Amino acid sequence: MKLAAGEVFFIYTTLPDTDAASAFGKALVERKLAACVNIFPGMTSIYEWQGNIQTDSETAMIIKTSRTVLDEAMTVAKDLHPYETPALLILPVTGGNADYLKWVADQTAQT
């Protein structure tokens, strides 16, 4: 499968802890909505929520997916996410190792 530019996407999100991120990521990979997820524990987030400044420990995650399942990946991610208003940000991949990009596309190909 030859990939056109813009066929692979990252979805960035944050979760409350590593356990939640692991379960979340596993569910996406098992459903072939993500080829891989990267989990980055130990992040501190400072933000305003409902009029109050909050400081919380969180875990960041990058979900690697393809255009063919991007919409479904976003829908499932929003449904599974424990936050009321989750950060689910789509980041286009504009280039990279062609073999890796092909692997992402192959892993997320729906049969």
Image: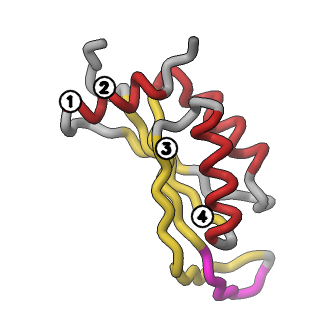
Point out the stretch of residues depicted in magenta: 51-58
Q: Residue at x 58, y 32 (%)?
A: 33
Look at the image and tell me in which quarter the N terminus lies: top left
Chief secondary structure of the magenta portion: strand
Q: Is residue 75 or residue 48 the one in the foreground?
A: 75
Q: Are marks 2 and 4 in contact (CB under 8 Å)?
A: no
Asked if the stretch drawn in magenta spans residue 108, the answer is: no
Residue for badge 3? 90
Query: What amino acid is at disc 2?
Result: Lys
Distance between mark 1 and mark 2 Cα atoms? 6 Å
Residue for badge 4? 14
Distance between mark 4 and mark 3 Cα atoms? 13 Å
Q: Is residue 106 left or right of residue 12?
A: left
Is 39 placed above or below 70 here? below
Circle 4 Cα neighbour tier, 10 Å, few/some/many (<14 / 14–19 / ≥20): many
Residue for badge 2? 102
Mark 1 or mark 4, whichever is nearer to me: 1
